[in-house]
Image (cartoon, grey):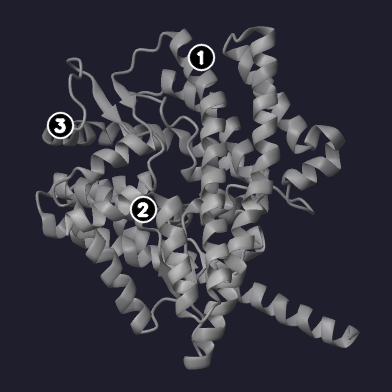
């Protein structure tokens, strides 16, 4: 079983997902040429967006890492970044069990009508593996670890169902949802957003388009990127030429992100239409959507502006925060809070930045808490060897880091963790109720818009 799933993973998302889309297209009676074109376009979109993310992280992230080295910080837990950290999770001896668990839960929920999301994002099985490992490590029970990871699968699917219309409105990509764990952080961010809505009263939300309207050319993607990148370059002591080049690189990334992200809509729109026609012809009351990874949001520059704005706060906080042992490095450009807050604030840049700033110490403390566990996993599996004595491995910006801390400390018998876990249940219901209302509001707006078009016709 492990070999079968590993061979799938080895293909990579850019190969495996197009194959899934082509097969899905043929299954719902699309022509071979159209299904092949849609699948290939999706592969191109994934490669394109990942190239830009890597380009952005290499340029801006490299400057930030140089700043860290120049400060001479001495923190004994080194941030690996999300890819090596999840690479360690894959090496856990029970990792392969999460594939049948996730697929089985999804099939059962679809069969009974408990979800409308068909999750094809197999790579984020690793996030359930990470949860299963951490809970098993603390509790000493594989059953408890797998049970908590299974609950995570259910919550991801339900959250995807209750945000699919909002996702469509924010991206214009039809027929998709996002069962990614990072968006479960919105259970906490939602009440924070409601509070900020009352405190920050503005007629229009401040997003990149609103910045353009208010400050003119300085809000243009390429100009905004140039200003941010050049500023980081000077802080990192790149010199004039190096700082200007970093400005050009950042402006390039912010300009190209929206262009490449349109490929997702080009690929998925025909698949979505064909799938829904096929489903409705056989099950008139069902509306199935495809669950994908978070990069379909990556074309929204509010996310990247928020990430870059949070980097100096993370570095400064790491130096002075009591109890922190983590040196943010590999995942300094952390996406999990920025992308989640983009969804829950509906792209309001000011509120996104505030939430990200407030969450920096939470991320640092929790990643310090988990560092010994990742270090032990590396020692058990031989994933990373020759660590200096006293050196630990950490994952700064781990998805749902606050929820994982809460659960693992509760399992460990910590009173604060137990209380927060109990409070988390009504908070989750409150969040789901709010998301359901948002979905209904969007559906009502669509109905009204349809009536208006009919009246005009």
* Residue 166 shows up from this direction: no
State which quarter of the image contains the N terminus: bottom left
x and y percent of residue 99 in the render?
Answer: 25, 60
**Residue at mark 2 to residue at mark 1: CA–CA distance:** 31 Å
Q: Which mark is residue 325?
A: none
Query: How packed is label 3: few (under 14 Cα within 10 Å), some, or many (20 or more)?
Result: few
Q: Which residue is mark 1?
A: 67
Residue at (83%, 82%) from the top-left corner?
A: 452
**Residue at mark 2 to residue at mark 3: CA–CA distance:** 22 Å
Marks 3 and 2: in contact by CB < 8 Å?
Answer: no
Nearest to the eye among marks 1 and 3: give it. Answer: 3
Work out whether mark 2 precedes mark 3 in sequence or the reverse, and give the earlier one. Answer: 2
Q: Which mark is residue 124?
A: 2
Residue at (53%, 58%) from the top-left corner?
A: 40
Marks 3 and 1: in contact by CB < 8 Å?
Answer: no
Residue farthest along the front direction in this orientation: 33
Residue at (27%, 34%) from the top-left corner?
A: 369
* Residue 246 shows up from this direction: yes
> In terms of secondary structure, where does tag 1 sit?
helix
Residue at (35%, 64%) from the top-left corner?
A: 425
Q: Which residue is mark 3?
A: 382
Query: How packed is label 2: few (under 14 Cα within 10 Å), some, or many (20 or more)?
Result: some
> In terms of secondary structure, where does tag 2 sit?
helix
């Amino acid at each position: 079983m492990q070999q079968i799933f590993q061979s799938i993973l080895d293909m990579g998302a850019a190969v495996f997902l197009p194959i899934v889309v082509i097969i899905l297209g043929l299954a719902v009676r699309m022509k071979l040429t159209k299904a092949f074109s849609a699948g290939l376009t999706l592969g191109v979109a994934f490669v394109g967006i990942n190239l830009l993310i890597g380009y952005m992280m290499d340029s801006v992230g490299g400057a930030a890492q140089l700043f860290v080295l120049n400060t001479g910080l001495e923190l004994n837990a080194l941030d690996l970044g999300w890819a090596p950290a999840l690479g360690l999770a894959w090496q856990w001896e029970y990792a392969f069990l999460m594939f049948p668990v996730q697929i089985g839960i999804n099939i059962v929920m679809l069969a009974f009508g408990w979800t409308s999301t068909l999750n094809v994002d197999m790579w984020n099985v690793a996030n359930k593996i990470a949860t299963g490992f951490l809970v098993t490590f603390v509790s000493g029970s594989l059953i408890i670890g797998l049970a908590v990871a299974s609950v995570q699968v259910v919550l991801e699917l339900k959250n995807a169902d209750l945000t699919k219309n909002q996702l469509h409105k924010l991206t214009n990509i039809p027929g998709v949802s996002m069962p990614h764990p990072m968006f479960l952080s919105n259970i906490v961010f939602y009440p924070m957003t409601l509070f900020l809505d009352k405190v920050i009263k503005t007629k229009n939300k401040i997003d990149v388009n609103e910045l353009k309207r208010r400050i003119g050319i300085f809000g243009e993607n390429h100009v905004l990127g140039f200003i941010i990148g050049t500023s980081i370059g000077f802080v990192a002591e790149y010199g004039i030429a190096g700082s200007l080049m970093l400005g050009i690189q950042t402006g390039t990334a912010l300009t190209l992100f929206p262009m490449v992200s349109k490929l997702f809509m080009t690929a998925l729109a025909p698949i979505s239409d064909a799938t829904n026609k096929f489903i409705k012809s056989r099950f008139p009351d069902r509306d199935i959507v495809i669950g994908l990874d978070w990069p379909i949001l990556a074309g929204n520059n509010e996310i990247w502006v928020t990430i870059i704005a949070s980097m100096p706060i993370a570095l400064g906080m790491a130096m002075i925060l009591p109890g922190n042992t983590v040196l943010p490095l590999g995942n300094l450009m952390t996406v999990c809070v920025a992308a989640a807050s983009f969804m829950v604030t509906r792209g309001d840049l000011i509120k996104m930045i505030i939430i990200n700033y407030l969450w920096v110490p939470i991320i640092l403390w929790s990643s310090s808490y988990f560092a010994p566990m990742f270090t032990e996993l590396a020692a058990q599996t031989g994933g990373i060897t020759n660590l200096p004595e006293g050196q630990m491995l950490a994952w700064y910006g781990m998805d749902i880091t606050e929820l994982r801390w809460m659960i693992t400390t509760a399992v460990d018998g910590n009173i604060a963790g137990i209380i927060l876990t109990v409070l988390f249940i009504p908070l989750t219901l409150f969040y789901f109720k709010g998301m359901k209302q948002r979905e209904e509001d969007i559906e009502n707006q669509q109905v009204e818009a349809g009536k208006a078009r009919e009246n005009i016709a």
